[in-house]
């Protein structure tokens, strides 16, 4: 936990100048989450492709890319999308794609502020539901999302074939 009050962390839309910080934040997320829970994920992806992807996301009005900034440094991020429903499931859904807050800034409500901004953005775009995925082996993430109103709806089971 940081000794800095959460009010010193600014949550805002990402800008092109934030891309290096976003790459570092995404690389930390991949290493900490997928890197310890899913051997099929290429944990080097953010370092090799993240900058290009984040530049696209910053410029795409249909995507949400937020940064949590402290002292001019990116200490967390959130990315999200909204998609129209289909004929099978005609519900407009907002997807929280990724969320990461550096360990030193956890338990300061930074993650909660990122989620709150995501939910407000989704509602502004007419989303009727929001969803997020978390690894079953990450109970801290599951509890975090449950505290913010998300509830288990489906379960995806995996079977490694190698």
Image (cartoon, helix red, strand yellow):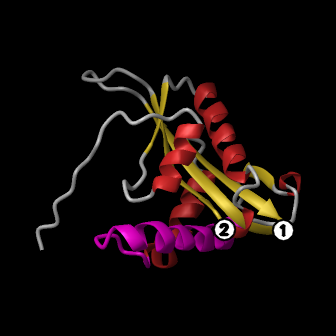
Q: Is residue 17 visible?
A: no
The residue shown at (16%, 60%) is: 159
The residue shown at (87%, 51%) is: 7
Relative image position of residue 5 (x, y in whole percent): 87, 57
Q: Are marks 2 and 1 in contact (CB under 8 Å)?
A: no
Q: Is residue 42 left or right of residue 69?
A: left
Front residue of this view, candidates 104 and 20: 104
Estimate how packed mark 2 is, as few (under 14), some (14 to 19) or many (20 or more) residues with alpha carbons within 10 Å. few
Dot 1: what SS? Answer: loop
Number of marks in the image? Answer: 2
Instruction: Farthest residue to the left: give it.
Output: 161
Quarter that holds the N terminus = bottom right
The residue shown at (42%, 47%) is: 133
Query: Which residues make up the magenta segment?
Result: 16-44
Quarter that holds the C terminus = bottom left
Query: Which mark, by number, is residue 58?
Result: none
Relative image position of residue 128 (x, y in whole percent): 49, 22
Which residue is disc 1 drawn over? 72
Looking at the image, is mark 2 or mark 1 earlier in the sequence? 1
Is residue 52 a member of the stretch shown in magenta? no
């Amino acid at each position: 936990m940081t000794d800095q009050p959460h009010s010193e962390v600014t949550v805002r839309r990402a800008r092109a100048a934030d891309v290096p910080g976003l790459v570092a934040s995404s690389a930390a997320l991949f290493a900490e989450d997928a890197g310890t829970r899913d051997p099929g994920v290429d944990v080097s992806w953010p370092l090799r492709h993240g900058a290009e992807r984040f530049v696209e996301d910053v410029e795409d009005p249909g995507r949400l890319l937020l940064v949590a900034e402290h002292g001019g440094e990116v200490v967390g991020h959130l990315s999200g999308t909204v998609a129209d429903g289909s004929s099978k499931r005609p519900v407009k859904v907002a997807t929280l794609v990724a969320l990461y807050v550096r360990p030193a800034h956890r338990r300061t409500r930074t993650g909660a502020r990122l989620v709150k901004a995501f939910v407000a953005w989704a509602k502004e775009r007419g989303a009727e539901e929001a969803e997020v995925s978390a690894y079953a082996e990450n109970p801290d993430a599951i509890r975090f999302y449950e505290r913010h109103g998300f509830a288990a709806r489906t379960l995806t089971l995996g079977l490694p074939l190698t």
